[in-house]
Structure formats: C-alpha cells, structure tokens
C-alpha cells in the first residue's frame, strides 16, 4: 500500500492559521485576556499605554493599536468593574454582577467576523469600531458569563497571596485554585513553613523572653 500523501505545505499552514485564529477567539482565551488586562490596568499606579498594548499583543490582537489617554481611562474603568466579578467569591454573586453589567453596559448580542479577518464570534459591543473600554467590558463579560454557565462556579478569583493582587481565571471542575501562579503558591507555602518553624521554636523555648527579677 503506498504511503499516504502529506497535505501541501500551504494547506497545512492554512489549517494551523485557522486553528490559531479560532483559539484566539475562544471563551477561555477571552477570559484569560480579560484577567491579564485587569491586572495591568488596576495593578497599582496608572498603566502605560505601551504596557496595555503589550498585553493585547500577547493575546493575539493583530490590528494596529493606538491608545489615547481617554481609551486608557475607559479601559481602566471597565477593568475595575471586571475586578469585582473576579473577586465575587461565589457563583451567585458573580452571576449577579455579570447580569447587571450585561444589562447596563452591553449592547445586543451579534456575530462578527471583522470583515473576514477572524472566525465568526459573538460580540456585545455596539460595533467593531467601538471604544476600547466598551469592547473590553463587553467581550470580557460575555466570556466570563459562559464560564459561569459551563462550570457553575465563579469564573475567576483574586490571588490569595498577601503580596499579590492579580486576578486569574479558574478552570474546570478540579480542586479550588487559590493562587494566580505557582510562584505565588510556592512563596506562600515557604512563608507558612517558616512561620510554623518559628512558632515551634518559640513554644519549645518557653513562649518568649524570660522576665528578669531583681533581688
């Protein structure tokens, strides 16, 4: 039997490109992008446009990005609203916050392919050329709402590390996730171990320094 003929290189490339585009517009990809933008926009001081653009590029935004000061301000406002969803703590509160944002801040559900530049996917902003803040809030709420629907749990959380305020997307039906990264989880485990050792040493030594009694 002759060996199967491999597909032409250009067809293989086209297939990979189509898969990459579909992945970039998946619910999980949009939710992770939302978390990354919330972190850069609300993580302390004002976010530089270049830092926001870097996150958008990391998450596959292909278009020329030119953010104005107004764009950044509106995106930060959206990010603060989304941070509340990530920090909701339980599924009922997360769903309630998302319902309110979708009612008050989103437009009607529509499908777009950005004039053939992307796979068909849903939007709830007014149009493809709408403001960045409106796009961030709408696309993020839609993705987070689908995660609530699919998993029946909060779509994300705020890192439990005392030295980190990052939000992150929770996934699947596995054990509850408390930290945004392995780095934060390891740092907290090391700190807890040190506290336990210090507490044990103090108890072994009598609980603290002895009082000195004069004659």
Image (cartoon, rainbow, N blue to C red):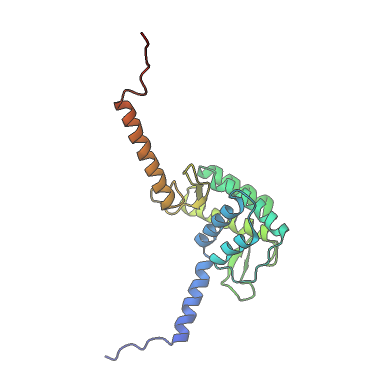
Point out residue 59 in the picture as x, y percentages from the top left corner: 54, 65
Quadrant in the picture for residue 191:
top left
- Nearest the camera: 94 or 197? 197
Furthest-front residue in view? 215
The residue depicted at 36 percent of the width and 89 percent of the height is 5
Quadrant in the picture for residue 69:
bottom right
Question: In this picture, is 171 found above or below 13?
Answer: above
Please state the total of marks drawn on the protein image. Answer: 0
Furthest-top residue in view? 215
| Residue 7 in sight | yes
Left or right: 9, with 133 as reference point: left
Quarter of the image where the N terminus is located: bottom left
Point out residue 164 in the picture as x, y percentages from the top left corner: 50, 46
Left or right: 125, with 2 as reference point: right
Furthest-left residue in view? 1
Furthest-bottom residue in view? 2
Question: In this picture, is 209 found above or below 45?
Answer: above
Quadrant in the picture for residue 138:
bottom right
Left or right: 210, with 26 as reference point: left
| Residue 108 in sight | no
Question: In this picture, is 51 found above or below 192?
Answer: below
Point out residue 96 in the picture as x, y percentages from the top left corner: 59, 45
Point out residue 208 in the picture as x, y percentages from the top left corner: 36, 24
The residue depicted at 59 percent of the width and 71 percent of the height is 62
Quarter of the image where the C terminus is located: top left
């Amino acid at each position: 039997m002759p060996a199967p003929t491999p597909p032409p290189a250009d067809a293989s490339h086209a297939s990979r490109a189509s898969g990459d585009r579909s992945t970039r517009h998946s619910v999980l990809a949009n939710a992770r992008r939302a978390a990354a933008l919330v972190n850069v926009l609300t993580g302390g001081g004002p976010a530089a446009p270049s830092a926001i653009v870097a996150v958008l590029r990391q998450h596959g935004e292909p278009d020329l990005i030119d953010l104005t000061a107004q764009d950044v301000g509106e995106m930060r406002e959206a990010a603060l609203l989304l941070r509340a969803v990530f920090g909701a703590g339980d599924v009922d509160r997360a769903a309630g916050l998302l319902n309110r944002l979708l009612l008050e801040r989103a437009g009607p559900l529509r499908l777009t392919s950005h004039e053939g530049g992307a796979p068909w996917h849903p939007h709830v902003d007014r149009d493809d050329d709408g403001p960045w803040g409106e796009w961030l809030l709408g696309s993020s709420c839609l993705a987070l709402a689908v995660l609530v629907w699919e998993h029946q749990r909060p779509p994300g959380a705020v890192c439990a590390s005392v030295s980190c305020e990052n939000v992150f997307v929770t996934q699947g039906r596995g054990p509850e996730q408390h930290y945004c990264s392995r780095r934060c989880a390891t740092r907290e485990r090391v700190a807890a171990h040190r506290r336990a050792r210090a507490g044990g040493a103090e108890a072994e030594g009598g609980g603290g320094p002895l009082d000195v009694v004069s004659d």
